[in-house]
Amino acid sequence: MSDAITPPFQGFPTAATGFFRELALNQSREWFAKHKTDYERFVRAPLGALLGAVTARLAATPLPLVGDPRRSVFRIHRDVRFGADKSPYKTNASAVWSRDGSKTSPGLIYFHFGANEIFVAAGLYMPMPEDLHRLRAGMACDPEAWAVIRHGLEKRGLTLMSEGALARVPRGFESAPTALHDDLRLKSWVVSRTIAPKTARSPELVGVITEHALACAELLEFGWTALEAA
């Protein structure tokens, strides 16, 4: 039995935005069960088509990233075990493109679609302590190479997100060049781009995500090299 053919990505329908707005007001399993076909039709189906379209576009580039509708999409169900908010559902859809198509592979592209926020991000998000140390060591061992990456991002109008940065340079990196200190304090190295709703509703979204991935290629390649050097 052959796999089903993924239709071309035509954009997210306006009904996808409406679905998430209604879901925010109806956080119950009964409501979701009644509207699950809307979720599958208006959200999951176009998201799967988007994953395939961007993967095909990236296949023509040196960037080894793929998206899989089965492995790359985050669940809409929230983990409510440890938080005060017991709402059972997320009010957004999200997925990744990574080297193996999984959500846990380091160095990836992340896409977020919600009623109030749509964006694409690229980089290395919250790596585990050992990987975090390796990434910082990669910067400290070759500050000139990192400076080139930084300059390239800035030239393209991209800025590393600084949320959650340490107050001081981490232990063991105090002797690194001063120019590196701000970046060494980061716990993630991610650049994000906001996407207009009009773009998300059109096939143009495929090109926007691909363009962002390529603009961040040197950042991703730096991360992979630093992690694999160990």
Image (cartoon, rainbow, N blue to C red):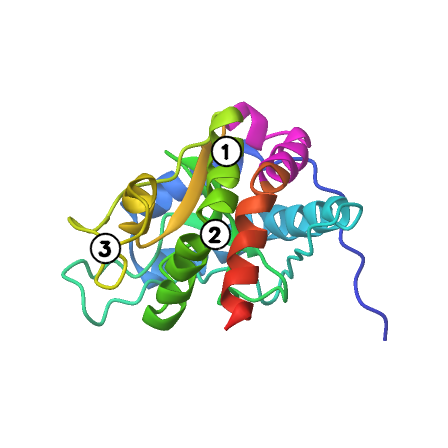
- What residue is pinned by disc 1? 153
Q: Secondary structure at mark 1?
A: helix
Question: Image quadrant of residue 29?
Answer: bottom left
Going by the numbered disc 3, the residue's amino acid type is Glu
Asked if the stretch drawn in magenta spans residue 199, the answer is yes
Q: Is residue 170 above or below residue 146?
A: below
| Dominant SS type (magenta) | helix
1 left or right, relative to 166: right
Q: Position of residue 74 (x, y in %)?
A: 47, 60
Q: Residue at x 67, y 57 (%)?
A: 66
The correct choice, above or below, for 51 with respect to 105 in the image is: above
Ranked by sequence position, the earlier of labels 3 and 2 is 2
Q: Is residue 159 left or right of residue 8?
A: left
Give x and y (percent) for residue 47.
60, 49
Residue 130, horizontal then vertical, whole percent:
36, 72
Indicate the quadrant containing the N terminus: top left, top right, bottom left or bottom right.
bottom right
Magenta residues, start to end? 197-212
The three-letter amino acid code for the residue at tag 1 is Leu
Residue at mark 2: 142
Residue at image point 54% right, 69% down: 229
Q: Residues within 10 Å of mark 2 (few under 14, many from 20)?
A: few
